[in-house]
Image: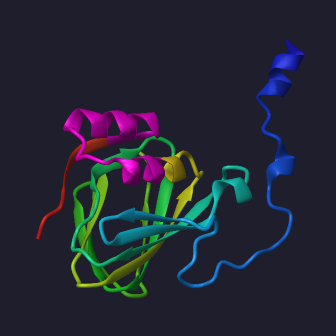
Amino acid sequence: MPLLAFSQIKNRNSRTQKSFVVRAGKSRVNESIKFGSNSNDIKISKTDTDDQLSIFEYIGYEKVGPALHLHFSQDEIFHVTEGVFRFVVGEEKMELNSGDTIFLPRNIPHTWIQLTDKGRLTYMVQPAGMMEEFFRQMSALTNPPTTEEIQKIHIAHGMKVMGPPLSL
């Protein structure tokens, strides 16, 4: 039984052991995850933090956002660095401008939509969960997924779709 307990302990030696810089317009892992003309760059990977934190930069050129969804085990923090975004968190609706930050607690349905022609967000997911894998899988789809396929992908990555995305 003790050996089984040790098998569940994450190897802490995989954690990044030195500082690093991710330059503007670049991703930590040299990939840009595209959704149309919008991108999600991984700035700090979960592999850098023993799955404790992931940080992403979203750059948007389309006035879109994700479906209303919730995360079972992750909190999110969004910081608007450019543009204006509308967020819905539970029953609350609010607009965030450049410089504003919002905390989205786990298990609360939320979504957002970009209101300006260009938008930029830096956001953190804690603990990291499966967000990096989720973005890769969604961006790799070659055909528009069905509602059932979208829900299946969300559930497999620790989330659940609760409703449609916002529209203007």
Q: Residue at x 82, y 22 (%)?
A: 5
Q: Camera-side residue: 79 or 43? A: 43
In this picture, is 103 found above or below 15? below
Q: Position of residue 50 (x, y in %)?
A: 73, 50
Q: Position of residue 81 (x, y in %)?
A: 43, 85
Q: Identify the residue at the far top of this view.
A: 1
Residue 30 can be seen in this image: yes
In this picture, is 103 found above or below 84? above
Report if residue 136 lies within the magenta region. yes
Residue 88 can be seen in this image: no
Q: Position of residue 52 (x, y in %)?
A: 66, 53
Q: Position of residue 123 (x, y in %)?
A: 49, 68
Residue 60 location, quadrant: bottom left
The total of numbered circles placed on residues is 0
Q: Is residue 59 left or right of residue 56?
A: left
In this picture, is 146 found above or below 117? above
Q: Residue at x 51, y 47 (%)?
A: 133
Q: Identify the residue at the far front of this view.
A: 142
Q: Residue at x 81, y 50 (%)?
A: 14
Residue 54 location, quadrant: bottom right
Q: Is residue 91 left or right of residue 104?
A: left
Q: Is residue 96 left or right of residue 5?
A: left
Q: Identify the image quadrant of the N terminus.
A: top right
Residues shaded magenta: 134-160
Colour theme? rainbow
Q: Camera-side residue: 122 or 58? A: 58
Report if residue 73 lies within the magenta region. no
Q: Identify the image quadrant of the C terminus.
A: bottom left
Q: Main secondary structure of the magenta part?
A: helix
Q: Camera-side residue: 164 or 142? A: 142
